Image: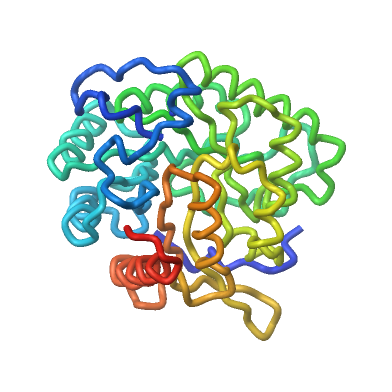
Amino acid sequence: MDYTRRAVLAGLGLAGLGAAMPRFGRKVAASSIMNSLVMDPAAEGAGTCPFRLAVINDEITRDFEKACQIVSGDFGLRWIELRSMWDKNVTELDAKQVEDARKILEEHKLRVTDIASPLFKTDWPGAPRSSQSESRDQFHAEFDASAQDKLLERCISLCKSFETDRIRCFDYWRLDDQKPYRAAINAKLQQAAERCAKDNIVLLLENEMSCNTATGEEAAAVLKAIPNKNFMLNWDPGNAAAIGSKPYPTGYELLPKDRVGHCHCKDVVSKPDHKYDWAPVGGGMVDWVGQLQALQRDGFRYGLSLETHWRGAGTPEASTRISMDGLKKTLAKAGISC
C-alpha cells in the first residue's frame, strides 16, 4: 500500500454489543441503539482502560492473521478496527474470506470496533468535480456515487458477520464551495443513518481533510443538522490538524460530547513549506494528553483506534509499533491506565 500520498497540505480546500454478546459464529444479539450507546466496556471485560483501545488492521500489515497476532499478542489489546486485508477492502471480501477472518479474530480473542468502510468517499453527484476525487486513500476500494446504497447494505451485513454495531463513513470529496450542496449531503447521511437504525447500527462520520467535513467546527455543524442519535462522529484530531485547524481544545470544545462514537489516533508535524506530515502519536502538534483526558472526563467509552499513517520507521509494522508505544506513553502521561 502506498502511504506516501497521504501527506497533505494545510490549505486543502452500538461499538461492542455488551457482555452477553455471543462469540463468533453465533447470531448477533439484539439490543436497542440507546442501550448500545451507553454500554460500559468495563462490563465487557475491558479491564481498567476506559476506552476500547484498538488498531486499524492494515496499518500494520496486509497479512490479516499477522496483524491480529501483533494486536493481541504483542500489544495486548482486545479490539481491532477492520479496513482492508488480503489486498481487498473489507467490503469486497467473499463469504469464505469473511469466515476465515472471523476464525482468525476468534483465535486471537479480538473483537471489532467498527467496519472502517469507504462509504460516501466519492464525488457528490451534480457538483463540480472535487480536486480530491482522484483515486487516493481508498484502501483497495472503488465505489462511485451510484453504488453507495448497495455498499451501505454490504456494510450492514458485515456488522452482523463481525458482531459490531458501527460503520465508518465520510461525506464526499471536498468541494471548493459545499454550501449549495450541504443540505442535500446531510439528507443523504440522515437517510443512511435511518437505514442503519433499523438494524441497531451506529453510523460514524469521520472528519477527513479531503472530504467536506474536516474539522471540529464543520463536524459540529453536521451533527447539529442531523440529530439522529445513531449518527455519531468518528473524531480524528490528526485529520483536523492536517488541514490547519486546532483540534484540541478549539475544535473538540464545539462537539456534542454524547455524539462522539469513535476516535482515531495519529499525529502531525508542520513542515517549513507550510505542508504537514504524519508523526508518531505524542510526537506532533496534537495535544493528545489533553484530548485523552477530555475524552475520559466526558464519558467517552468507545473505540480509540491507532491509525498510524506515519512511516518513518521504514515499514508499516515497525512504524505502528513505535506509534503504539507513543500512544501508550501518552495515555500514561494523561493518567489513563490502558
Of all residues, the one furthest to the right in this rendering is 180
Residue 44, relative to residue 29: is it above or below? below
Q: Is residue 163 left or right of residue 257?
A: left
Of all residues, the one furthest to the bottom in this rendering is 272
> How did the renderer colour the structure?
rainbow
Of all residues, the one furthest to the left in this rendering is 107
User: Where's residue 81, x and y in %?
Assistant: 37, 45
User: Where's residue 310, x and y in %?
Assistant: 45, 69
- Residue depicted at x 74% and y 51%: 217
Q: Quadrant of residue 43?
A: top left
Q: Is residue 252 left or right of residue 91?
A: right
User: Where's residue 44, x and y in %?
Assistant: 28, 36
Q: Quadrant of residue 192?
A: top right
Q: In front: 264, or 253?
A: 253
Q: Is residue 140 left or right of residue 197?
A: left
Q: In front: 254, or 214?
A: 254
State the quadrant of the C terminus.
bottom left
- Residue depicted at x 20% and y 40%: 105
Q: Quadrant of residue 82?
A: top left
Q: How many numbered marks are there?
A: 0
- Residue depicted at x 27% and y 29%: 19
User: Where's residue 285, x and y in %?
Assistant: 59, 74
State the quadrant of the N terminus.
bottom left
